[in-house]
Amino acid sequence: MEKSALKEEILRLKKEKNAVILAHYYQIDDIQEIADIRGDSLALAIEASKIDCDIIVFCGVRFMAETAKVVSPNKKVLLPVENAGCPLADMATKDAVLKRKEELGDVAVVSYVNTNVDVKTVSDYCCTSANAVNVVRQIKEKRVLFVPDRNLGEYVREQVKEKEVYLWDGFCPTHEEFSLDALMRAKREHPSAKVAVHPESPKAIRDTADFIGSTSGIISYVEKTDADEFIIGTEEGILFELKKRSPAKRFYIIGGSSVCSNMKKIALEDLYNSLKLENYEIILDDETIQKAKEPIQKMMQIKRN
Ligand code: 13P
């Protein structure tokens, strides 16, 4: 099918089935363009909990669709590509988290939303990159096991000095690839550019940045900052929203390009098939939903920074 016909069919099916399409900022442009709502992990989780529809088609990776199912258990939640996963999420298992928690004794487990749902069932609080600092700062516990991203965890530890934050040895392969050499080269080539990076980036990158924040944080920083050029340290799907909101500004991804292959798995055809065949449905048992809901709800009650 031609792209325009495919888009028309997606819109028709969406209406017929009373479905809503959510897309993360790392999705391909065609998907972001056709989505009802684009956003960062936190915004999409909040939207999923309050939209009125029968079906949520989640264009993102599995942990995001699982989170949508947990907060909207009565809706059918679809992930258009079954194996769109997250290597960072796979770096922490429920058993390993329980073991580490036992070793550390009295700690609160704060798990990044980039975890598989069974890890959330043994977490005390959930967080996203948009609210991680606030969540750790505002909870009553003084000792925290932060799972699974060591870079975001280290950033939180730097910001919340009054708490004892234990790190997990996980990382996002896409952000971990950013090198200081590549960033310094970009700064030499674009000396007046501001540097905005995601907190999943390594410390040397964060320490060289003018701004550190979630994908939506980066988007609003760019929008309100009086500069013509920006060096960006996150997955390049974000360029869609950056260019849309700030068309006169210029953007350079550290190292020239940064791609999360999982986020790029969903093509328009997959979205069409997902709506047509209603696959791939996220199925979670009631106990998992109930247990995973608690840390997610606690997160949603904390204001974003
Ligand atoms: P955001 O919450 O900033 O959108 O990040 C999502 C993510 O998976 C980063 O790798």
Image (spheres, rainbow, N blue to C red):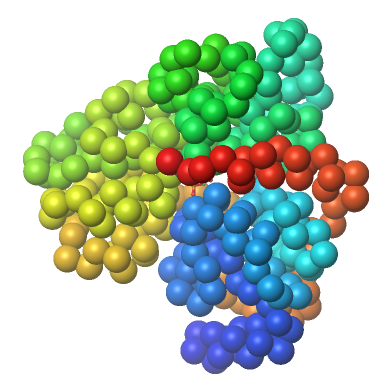
- Count every numbered label the image shows and give the total: 0
On the question of residue 150 being in view, the answer is yes
Residue drawn 34% across the image and 54% down it = 219
How far across and down, in percent of the image, does residue 173 sit? 50, 36
Using the image, determine if residue 123 lies above or below residue 250: above
Using the image, determine if residue 250 lies above or below residue 106: below
Q: Can you tell which quarter of the image residue 266 is in?
A: bottom right
Residue drawn 47% across the image and 13% down it = 162
**Side of 288 relative to 238 (left or right):** right
Seen from the viewer's position, the closer of residues 169 and 64 is 64
How far across and down, in percent of the image, does residue 32 sit? 48, 69
How far across and down, in percent of the image, does residue 122 sit? 78, 30
Q: Can you tell which quarter of the image residue 100 is in?
A: top right
**Side of 56 relative to 224 (left or right):** right
Residue drawn 9% across the image and 43% down it = 192
The quarter of the picture where the C terminus appears is: top left
On the question of residue 100 being in view, the answer is no
The quarter of the picture where the N terminus appears is: bottom right
How far across and down, in percent of the image, does residue 280 sit? 77, 65
Residue drawn 69% across the image and 69% down it = 56
